[in-house]
Amino acid sequence: MTREKQDTSQVEAPVQTGHEVIQSYLKTLDNSPGVYRMLDTKGRVLYVGKARSLKKRVSNYAKPTGHSARIARMISQTASMMFLTTRTETEALLLEQNLIKQLKPHFNVLLRDDKSFPNILLTGHEFPQIKKHRGARKENGQYFGPFASADAVNRTLNQLQKVFLLRNCTDATFDARTRPCLQYQIKRCAGPCVGKIDAEGYGALVRDAGDFLSGRTTKMQESLAADMQAASEAMEFEKAAVLRDRIRALTQVQQSQGINPQGVAEADVIALHMEGGQACVQVFFIRANQNWGNRDFYPRTGAGAGPGEALQAFVGQFYDQKEPPRLILLSDPLDEQDLMAEALTEKLGRKVEISVPQRGEKSELIANAQRNARESLARKMAETATQAKLLDGMSKAFGLDGPPHRVEVYDNSHIQGAHAVGAMIVAGPEGYMKSQYRKFNIKGDDLTPGDDFGMMKEVLTRRFKRLLKEDPDREGDGWPGLLLIDGGAGQVSAVYEIMEELGVTDIPMIGVAKGVDRDHGKEEFHRRGQRPFALQRNDPVLYFVQRLRDEAHRFAIGTHRAKRAKAQGATPLDEVPGVGATRKRALLQHFGSAKAVSRAGLEDLKAVDGISETLAETIYGFFHDRA
């Protein structure tokens, strides 16, 4: 009996979860504002929340009843909690959104696509360049944006060049020109590089472009019309025709922007539509009384959050790394709208208003955005259903245990072994997962040029070594359910050897080899230990695999071309300590080539603008010591 009692006492007791666990924390909490985390039995974060009073908020969770189904599930899985106090509730709100983005808890609403938005930049050069800019605003000049997408910027730039004739070439190209380029010939640039227009005339074009992007279009069109009339009366018909074309192009820009509100100068219009446990948020960017495009987002709904919570989480995460406008128009009120406005105002340093309009032009903007959100979500749900059928068909065609949640497709690209890169694309139930795409610079010095087997081995080794290091227990969603390899039996065997060495042999892999005459529809599929097989030419799964392979090939080719272009622009000057882009350009303009720089004497190097005596000695020593 004694032995039996001792054995029983050594059995590990199950970890306690639920509202009783939460209750135990109350005695250690006070009414300070802060952020709390709820964790499960494995220490994974279930939920991150903020509170004006941590004690009061946690006491609500400690009650055994009165919760929604979603909150009840979350409480039942909670095994421990973590707390962090802040000075104010506003600080707690900002910290909460940072932690949600970092930890991605299951029960929180999560903005999954959080890329930066492009702007238009008029550079600070004497003859400014107009170009697309993405990222931090570090370069001197005037910024206009954000625009919803690169396409929206490119369309606007294309029209602006027709209207204002501003250059789009780099400063280095501008400085090196000796005769007009094609842009000047097709009337898309005023030709400042070769003196076709002076600084004053070009400056007037820059001011007009700035006025247009700032919304001051009416006065500009009136001025252009008056100038055209004056030129016509003076029988300067060529000048009048140029002005006429500028007015037409300006009108086309305004028409292509669609809705251009008169009473809303600067705002983000944000509308939410929820259906079937999914959500779509549509964002329209209104700047300078112009519509600069719209974009849809599909946030994870946190296992059933309501509209107020979902939209509040979206707004907080959306503006975490972006500058909010002066006015944010919403389709639904936030759970804590005043607090969010206060947090964004504090972050921006000027007042930010959050409004849910009920009538007038602003209400029409919201209605338009909400209609777009509803239609976008319907398309997304239809595409997801189609994708689910294709993944299920793939499972049956390839004899998998079930539809793969994540398909990884690999390809290589090189020219006779030069500038070799590997590429991985990812697809899942919602289509291509472009944020998961990866590129690999092939590093193997001992590889024979053009050794596709060796390249594939290197890519797969690096990919799965990292995966094993980051998630050895396979608790995350980064592990694939299927590998598609571009190639036949040889590539499949090479990949299997790597997987066997790493101890990862349970992931199915399929080699996709081009069939007879390398023709679409005649592909052969290879699995280790099985005979090659093919699918019917009209099989939707075959088309699906072809699209996946073509996407991997497109991504690999694009990566290879970018690497090759970068290498072609490289010179030995890139390796010289202290020589950056500006000094490199000055040296090349002075001497004509990197080879001439390497042969230059010390005194000649000192004569270059921007090259100090110390740097000249460094450059001279770099080339002559190597010799």
Image (spheres, helix red, strand yellow):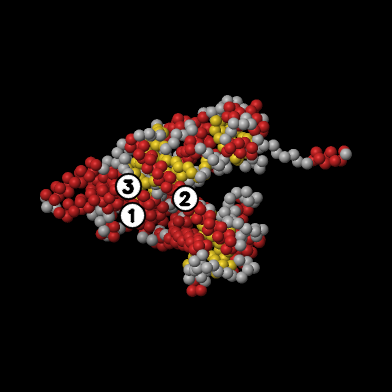
- Residue 627 appears in view: no
Q: Which residue lies furthest to the bottom in this view?
A: 517
Q: Height in image: 135 above or below 325?
A: below
The residue shown at (55%, 35%) is: 49
The residue shown at (40%, 33%) is: 355
Secondary structure under tag 3 reads: loop
Q: What residue type is labelled 3?
A: Gln
Q: Residues within 10 Å of mark 3 (few under 14, many from 20)?
A: some
Return the x and y of residue 121 as percentages of the image width and height. 35, 47
Disc 2: which residue:
380
Disc 3: which residue:
257
Disc 1: which residue:
169
Give the Cα distance between marks 1 and 2: 39 Å
On the rendered structure, is 321 left or right of 4?
left
Secondary structure under tag 2 reads: helix
Give the Cα distance between marks 1 and 3: 25 Å
Q: Which quarter of the image is occupied by the N terminus?
A: top right
